[in-house]
Image: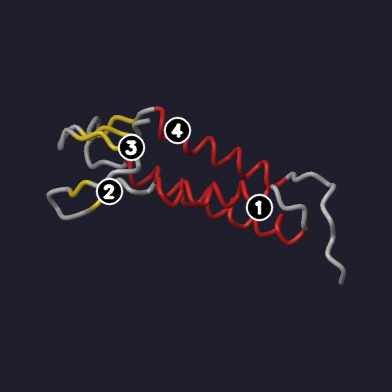
Amino acid sequence: MPWAYYHNVQETFTGFHVIQFPAGSYYGKAGIPISIMASIVLLFMLIPKLWAKRFNLFIAAVLFAYTLRTYIIFTSALFEGEVEKFAGIYLVILLSVVILVCTLFPKDNFKKSPE
């Protein structure tokens, strides 16, 4: 699903391919770490331990911060109308918020480790 379209270079970014701008900057591969962090969160949601829930909350907060950073980088422009935002970039932010809320309120049937 496309994230943004840059009119000055006539390129659509999806978050998974890499393109080099004339200034030498690379953009477009932010979807890979987002996918990795989301899969780690999903894995730790299945582990019924208190330490897993705490680690999951940390990873979800990092994921949310990274998606905010990605949104700012992908949608910022010097001139108005230079970047056209698509539904994919909004879904990345929305789904990271959903993941963060889900990790804030885990199920209560986890096993506490002996202290």
Q: Which mark is residue 74?
A: none
The earlier-in-sequence mark between 2 and 4 is 2
The nearer-to-camera label among 1 and 4 is: 1
Q: Which mark is residue 27?
A: 2
Q: Which residue is mark 4?
A: 90
Q: Give the residue type that dot 4 points to.
A: Tyr
Residue placed at 47% from the left, 38% from the top?
92
Q: Could you tell me how far apart the alpha carbons at marks 1 and 2 are, in whole angstroms?
A: 30 Å
Quarter location, residue 3: top left
Q: Which residue is mark 1?
A: 44
Kindly give the residue lying farthest to the right in the view shown: 114
Q: Could you tell me how far apart the alpha carbons at marks 3 and 2 are, in whole angstroms?
A: 10 Å
Residue placed at 68% from the left, 48% from the top?
45
Q: Could you tell me how far apart the alpha carbons at marks 3 and 4 are, in whole angstroms?
A: 12 Å
x, y (%) of residue 29? 33, 48
The earlier-in-sequence mark between 3 and 2 is 3
The earlier-in-sequence mark between 3 and 1 is 3
Q: Could you tell me how far apart the alpha carbons at marks 3 and 1 are, in whole angstroms?
A: 27 Å
Q: Give the residue type that dot 3 points to.
A: Thr
The earlier-in-sequence mark between 1 and 2 is 2
Q: Give the residue type that dot 2 points to.
A: Tyr
Q: Is residue 91 above or below residue 64?
A: above
Element type at mark 4: helix
Q: Which residue is mark 3?
A: 14
**For the residues bearing labels 1 and 4, Cβ distance under 8 angstroms:** no
Quarter location, residue 62: bottom right
Decide: few, some or many residues near mark 1? Use Cα within 10 Å; few <14, some 14-19, many ≥20. Answer: many
x, y (%) of residue 103? 68, 47
x, y (%) of residue 70? 40, 47
The N terminus lies in quadrant: top left
